[in-house]
Image (spheres, helix red, strand yellow):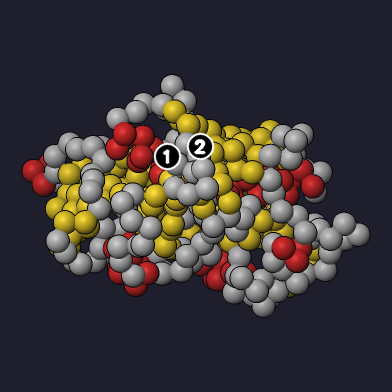
């Protein structure tokens, strides 16, 4: 893999959130890069939303992905590739959408959508279009998503309605009379948990805990066992949540197909819904993730709004 990089910020974060300084001589300031392909090279722009980082590829001239999932996964490698939690391809829109989002995780799997990724994609296409604000309708495998870039640079996203029916999350855990999975006992990694299941177009298992420190919650051990447990036939994202107040929740996440990440937008939405269902929080919350804060509101009309940042890190070309 050969990379030619131009940086926007001069700094990046590793997976633990530590700041990494780029060598000044190796980088120049640049904006988003297009077109997607030039010979055997792919032009990309790396964006991050609260440290959840993605490689964005402009593929608006074709509905076919320009590379295989295996090649996308190699681009995500933090030692031998560009580095990222996933590759997001911007495809032409259909059925009234401005664009279509396809995302390949760092393990080569394809999720339905990604909350932080949708903010990064909105900022990417706005940068390509030379816009500082505006609204988009983006088609995803989870349905249409509508991000709005505000004048202050924050991006508010109508994430749609949560799916609460256990069979549709999907999970085979026992349900209540309304078909929901709310604080159902479950044993994972030799420990007893109470699990609430919510889908935001992708599956989430939410567990409320008293301590998020790694000594009490060894995520690298527990996370994979939740993700691959047989009660989750499509695997699952897992959020471990500490309630700080009825309007402030803190979380760590194990993402399906990506492992531990600094932020998960759909997870922040799902855990807010779970906290309301469990009587632990109000419908509007600040969710503190390892990479920063998101504002989440579950409106009375059953739709959820997620508001947070997305920023360009650097742009370049990679030969693969």
Determine which residue is flagged by label 1.
Answer: 122
Please say if 149 is above or below 89.
Answer: above
Give the image location of residue 57, x and y in percent: 31, 52
Among the 4 quarters of the image, the one containing residue 281: top right
Among the 4 quarters of the image, the one containing residue 294: top right
Q: Nearer the viewer, residue 97 or 217?
A: 97
Give the image location of residue 223, x and y in percent: 57, 66
| Number of numbered markers | 2
Give the image location of residue 7, x and y in percent: 21, 42
Q: Nearer the viewer, residue 93 or 65?
A: 93
The structure residue drawn at horizontal position 52% and vertical position 53%, both measured from the top left corner, is 140
The structure residue drawn at horizontal position 44% and vertical position 52%, both measured from the top left corner, is 101
Q: Quick one: label 1 or label 2, which is nearer the N terminus?
A: 1
Determine which residue is flagged by label 2.
Answer: 147
Query: 10 Å neighbourhood of mark 2: few (<14), some, or many (≥20)?
Result: many
Please say if 252 is above or below 50.
Answer: below
Give the image location of residue 157, x and y in percent: 55, 37
Specify whether residue 101 is in view: yes
The structure residue drawn at horizontal position 23% and vertical position 48%, both measured from the top left corner, is 35
SS category of the residue bearing label 1: helix
Determine which of the numbered discs, if any, sits on residue 239 in the image: none
Distance of label 1 from label 2 (alpha carbons): 7 Å
Please say if 282 is above or below 262.
Answer: above
Q: Nearer the viewer, residue 228 or 125?
A: 125
Q: Nearer the viewer, residue 188 or 148?
A: 148
Which residue sits furthest left? 25
The structure residue drawn at horizontal position 67% and vertical position 77%, both measured from the top left corner, is 230
**Relative to 103, is 142 on the left or the right?**
right
**Relative to 209, is 228 on the left or the right?**
left
Q: Are marks 1 and 2 in contact (CB under 8 Å)?
A: yes
């Amino acid at each position: 893999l050969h990379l030619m990089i131009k940086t926007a910020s001069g700094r990046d974060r590793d997976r633990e959130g530590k700041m990494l300084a780029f060598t000044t001589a190796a980088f120049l300031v640049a904006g988003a890069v297009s077109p997607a392909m030039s010979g055997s090279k792919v032009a990309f722009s790396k964006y991050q939303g609260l440290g959840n980082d993605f490689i964005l590829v402009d593929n608006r001239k074709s509905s076919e992905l320009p590379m295989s999932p295996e090649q996308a996964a190699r681009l995500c490698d933090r030692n031998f590739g560009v580095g990222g939690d996933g590759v997001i391809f911007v495809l032409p829109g259909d059925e009234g959408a401005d664009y279509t989002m396809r995302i390949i995780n760092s393990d080569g799997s394809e999720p339905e959508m990604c909350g932080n990724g949708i903010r990064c994609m909105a900022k990417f296409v706005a940068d390509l279009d030379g816009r500082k604000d505006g609204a988009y309708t983006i088609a995803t495998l989870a349905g249409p998503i509508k991000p709005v870039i505000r004048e202050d640079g924050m991006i508010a996203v109508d994430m749609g309605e949560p799916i609460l029916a256990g069979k549709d999350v999907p999970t085979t855990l026992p349900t209540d009379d309304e078909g929901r999975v709310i604080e159902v006992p479950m044993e994972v990694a030799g420990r007893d948990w109470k699990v609430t299941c919510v889908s935001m177009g992708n599956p989430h298992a939410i567990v409320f805990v008293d301590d998020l420190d790694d000594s009490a919650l060894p995520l690298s051990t527990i996370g994979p066992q939740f993700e691959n447990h047989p009660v989750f036939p499509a695997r699952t994202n897992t959020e471990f949540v500490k309630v700080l107040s009825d309007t402030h929740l803190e979380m760590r996440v194990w993402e399906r197909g990506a492992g531990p990440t600094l932020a998960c937008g759909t997870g922040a939405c799902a855990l807010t819904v779970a906290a309301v269902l469990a009587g632990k929080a109000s419908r509007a919350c600040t969710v503190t993730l390892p990479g920063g804060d998101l504002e989440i509101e579950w409106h009375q009309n059953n739709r959820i709004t997620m508001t947070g940042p997305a920023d360009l890190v650097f742009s370049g070309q990679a030969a693969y």
